[in-house]
Amino acid sequence: MLAVSIMAGVFLGFLWDIYRLIRHYGRFKTAGTVIGDILYWIISINLCTRLILDISYGNVRFFILMGFTAGALLYFYGISRYILKFFIFIIDAVIKAVKTIIHLLIDPVKFIIGKIKIILYPVKLKFIRIKDKFKKRYKFLKYKLKKVSKNRKMIYNRKKRQGRKRGMVTHRQRNAPK
């Protein structure tokens, strides 16, 4: 029973190292770390409770708790750093391989797009010239419309003034209170 509890302590240490790897590559903020810690402790308490139920039929004995502690200490002070380095090496190698594969797939596409841009550059220049020509025409028409609109207002106001000089009754004069 002691050997099983020591192995369970080593396994709990191994789970903690996996959680440390997840935190290392996940780069969680404070809330993520708190949630991760709570999940780890829920899993480890569940595992310990089941093991105690299986080993000693639910009787919590001192040597079982000492076995958990001794196993975790053996793991953390013995092989934890080597296992952590090994997993980091494996994960970094996988990440590097995935990045290399992505670059091998994307670089030819970038090259083809660059060549298409070079081929279509004269067409782009033609469209830019057409766009600039339309912009100039639009600005010119807008300017002319403003000028015409301003002239209309001026003509309207001039007619209004001439009507007053001749003695015509305006709308305001007709509706004014007497």
Image (tube, rainbow, N blue to C red):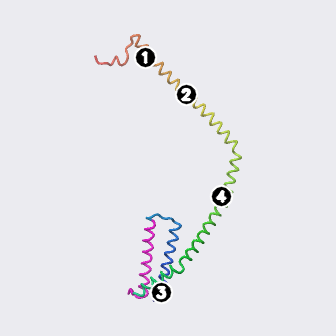
Which of the marked residues, 4 or 1, is nearer the chain's N terminus?
A: 4
Judge whether 43 appears above or below 26 on screen.
below
Q: Mark 2 points at which residue?
A: 143
Mark 1 vs mark 3, foreground winner is 3
Q: Mark 3 points at which residue?
A: 4
| SS type, badge 3 | helix
Judge whether 67 appears above or below 94 on screen.
below
Magenta stretch: dominant secondary structure: helix
- Mark pair 4, 2: CA separation: 49 Å
Q: Which residue is drawn at 57% across and 73% down?
A: 87
- Position of residue 48 in the picture relative to residue 138 (left or right): left
Q: Are marks 4 and 1 in contact (CB under 8 Å)?
A: no
Which of the marked residues, 1 or 2, is nearer the chain's N terminus?
A: 2
Q: Name the residue under label 4.
A: 106
Task: Point out residue 73 in the picture as x, y percentages from the top left corner.
Answer: 48, 81
| SS type, badge 2 | helix
- Position of residue 117 in the picture relative to residue 17 (left or right): right
Which of the marked residues, 4 or 2, is nearer the chain's N terminus?
A: 4
Range shown magenta: 32-61
Q: Residue furthest front?
A: 77
- Mark pair 3, 4: CA separation: 51 Å
In the rendered structure, find residue 160 and report the number of the disc placed on it.
Answer: 1
- Mark pair 1, 3: CA separation: 108 Å
Mark 4 vs mark 1, foreground winner is 4
